[in-house]
Amino acid sequence: MKTELTELLGIEYPIIQGGMAWVAEYHLAAAVSEAGGLGLIGAANAPADWVRDQVRQVKKLTDKPFGVNIMLMSPYADEVAKVIVEEGVPVVTTGAGDPEKYMKMWKDAGVKIIPVVASVALARRMERCGADAVVAEGTESGGHIGETTTLVLVPQVVDAVSIPVIAAGGIADGRGIAAAFMLGAKGVQMGTHFVATEECHVHQNYKDMILKAKDIDTRVTGRTTGHPVRALRNQMTKEYLKKEAEGASFEELEQLTLGGLRRAVVDGDVKTGSVMSGQSAGLVKEQMTCAQLIQKLVKETDALLKGTAFYE
Ligand code: TUI
């Protein structure tokens, strides 16, 4: 499965693990990188020293390439951006904003830059600013999302830029990966399936909820506040959507989600917590190790792509 992306990053398989807030810590990142993909540490809203420590820990567990995802709405984004350079992180991905102001610093330090985008316009801007690749993330994804589906977004981003495009959103098996290649992507980013792996440190209740989820089990809260977030439906999403429909204030709605991701991930409170997940939860049936998952994905994708133009 050699593509422009595996060449660019020096990895075996073109599979990137999403930089999920509270979920993507060093054990998961190291396991994915060791298995031949690209593991990511999700900096989310964490302070710079936490990120620095995570980077040092991941380096103890693997010599292979890994990355850090910076959530650009974080109050610590400026400091975390510097930690990337100071600690010699090989790859940075960004989400929930425009990373332009950091890109010169990262490029000068030789960091590979992969912004996550949900629109063609931002993909174009990122290429002009020197991005090495982009993740085109469809609305099927978990967490903070854009409007457009993966099937529609990926080929339009592929047509608009000449850097490699990585497809994300709704991909959890070899069929999704093969389809992403058909859309012109050179790799995929997956989040949800990696949450339900052995090495992922989220509470077992969180994993079980993903494993049991059906096709129609996610909800998007916050469409009216400008911060749409996809999560598995529970008491929190039900109350939130009811209040949102009644025209509740931003502050009142915020109260319902405050600390909710931490409660779900750490305490296993999957009733009032925020169980962020993509629509692909319906495709996730089995908990396995990261190596088993990546081998399964590669085998499935290989079988589908044999005899196609991709494998000439
Ligand atoms: O960032 C994500 N997914 C996330 S971040 C996150 S942490 C969080 N927790 C609670 C509430 C809100 C966030 C959870 N999930 N994905 C990448 C992504 N980026 N999706 C959409 C975007 C995006 C949206 C608008 C990127 C840029 C943008 O506008 C930037 C501009 O200036 O055009």
Image: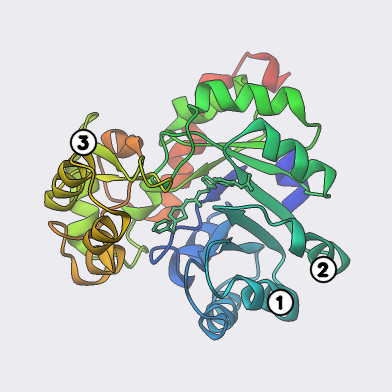
Q: Nearer the viewer, residue 95 or 133?
A: 95
Foreground of the two, 15 or 49: 49
Quote the CA–CA distance across marks 1 and 3.
39 Å
Q: Label 1 neighbourhood size at 10 Å, few (<14), some (14-19), many (20+)? A: some
Residue of label 2: 105
Camera sees residue 286? yes
Mark 1–mark 2 contact, CB under 8 Å? Answer: yes
Q: Is residue 111 left or right of residue 178?
A: right
Q: Amino acid at mark 2?
A: Met
Sequence-earlier tag: 3 or 2: 2
The residue to which callout 3 is attached is 217
- Rendered position, 282 above or below 235: above
Q: Quadrant of residue 53?
A: bottom right
- Count of numbered circles in the view: 3
Could you classify mark 3 by the number of other residues whose Cα lies within 10 Å: few (under 14), some (14-19), or many (20 or more)? Answer: some
At 78% from the left and 49% from the top, the residue drawn is 131
Q: Position of 106 compared to 98: left or right?
A: right
Task: Identify the image quadrant of residue 101.
Answer: bottom right
SS type, badge 1? helix
Q: Which residue is mark 1?
A: 82
Q: Residue at x 55, y 86 (%)?
A: 49
Q: Look at the image and tell me whether residue 11 can be seen.
A: no
